[in-house]
Amino acid sequence: MNTANKLAMVAAAVATVFGATGAFAQNFTYNNTDLLLNFRQQPVGGSASISDVTFDLGNVSTFLATYGNSSVVLNSASVSKFDASLLTGATGAGYGSLNNVYFSVAASDNNAANTTTVNALWMSALRNSSTDNTVAGSTMKNAVNQATQSGSAANIASVGSQASQFGTALSPNSVKTVDATTGYNAVSLGGTYGNYFTGTEGFTGAAFASTDKVRVDLWSLQGGLGRTGNVPAVYQGFFELSGNGDMTWVGKGFTGVVPEPTTYGILAGLGMLALTTRRQLRRA
């Protein structure tokens, strides 16, 4: 085989690999009980943005099992579950900034085959200014029977399924949808999920500065099979959106000090400095 043919085969193989990677990058698939981080932009009394954005954070039970005792920046390289540029950038939703942005977090078990957990819900609620992650900074209605929670469970699942079917993928776990029809805003009825919940969303306001923060708590509402009474929802932790574009999750079981977003970079730099110094000392 001559050199030209070999080069052609290598080029074709490379193109195939990159083509497959590109196809994967455009994949977005919602699964039952996935935790959805949803965004919409609408000035108070003004017109909504054309697009909403949904990030799929993966199975809610896995998320809580992994990060329930942790504080993690969701847009860090090690986690990569969020990217604010997909909200603000022209190739994303095109918001231009994080001003006037509403966001909420939700998951549901909408599988009737799961007889003991069907219509279980996980829902956000606007948190107060407290940074004590061990206690809730909001209130949530009680968990009730499965039949009562079924409408919201289906509504949450519909946000995910509409995003999968009709959205434009922005990354493997994010998609933009049309606000007025198939988007989070339209499907969830403005974050109320069938008018069953109120106060689920954080709102950045008209001038969201780089040091500003908005937080929402995450609650678990397990609607028991055949339940006739109500039980309290269970607080899980909170999500924090910063004006600099960081999205941080702080689980209720986290016992350390939550660093400021810029501190993570400083700590990483100090770690590299310490490693370099150690190597130099060993050489010496």
Image: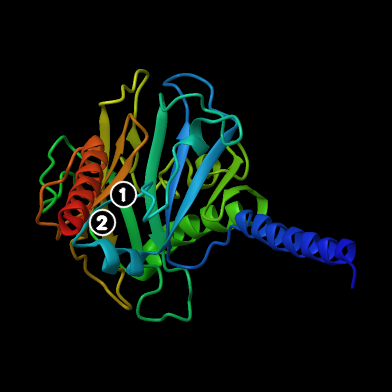
**3D distance between C-alphas at marks 2 and 1:** 6 Å
Q: Amino acid at mark 2?
A: Trp
C-beta proximity under 8 Å, tags 2 and 1: yes
Circle 2: element type: strand
| Residue drawn at x 57%, y 62% as measured from the top left | 29
Coloration of the structure image: rainbow
- Depth check, front residue: 119 or 201: 201
- The numbered disc on residue 81 is none
In this rendering, the answer to whether 180 lies above or below 77 is above
- The numbered disc on residue 124 is 1
| Residue drawn at x 52%, y 27% as measured from the top left | 95
Q: Residue 66 at what x, y percent from top left?
A: 28, 66
In this rendering, the answer to whether 80 lies above or below 108 is above
In this rendering, the answer to whether 45 lies above or below 203 is above
Circle 1: element type: strand
Q: Residue 220 at what x, y percent from top left?
A: 27, 61
Quarter of the image with the N terminus is: bottom right
- Which of pointers 2 and 1 lies earlier in the amino acid sequence? 1
Compared across the picture, whether 235 is left or right of 62 comes to left
Q: Can residue 144 be seen here?
A: no
Q: Residue 172 at what x, y percent from top left?
A: 55, 55
Q: Amino acid at mark 1?
A: Ser
Q: Residue 201 at what x, y percent from top left?
A: 35, 39
| Residue drawn at x 22%, y 39% as measured from the top left | 266
Compared across the picture, whether 189 is left or right of 1 comes to left
In the picture of the structure, the residue carrying the numbered disc 2 is 219
In this rendering, the answer to whether 228 lies above or below 234 is below
Label 2 environment density (alpha carbons within 10 Å; few <14, some 14–19, many ≥20): many
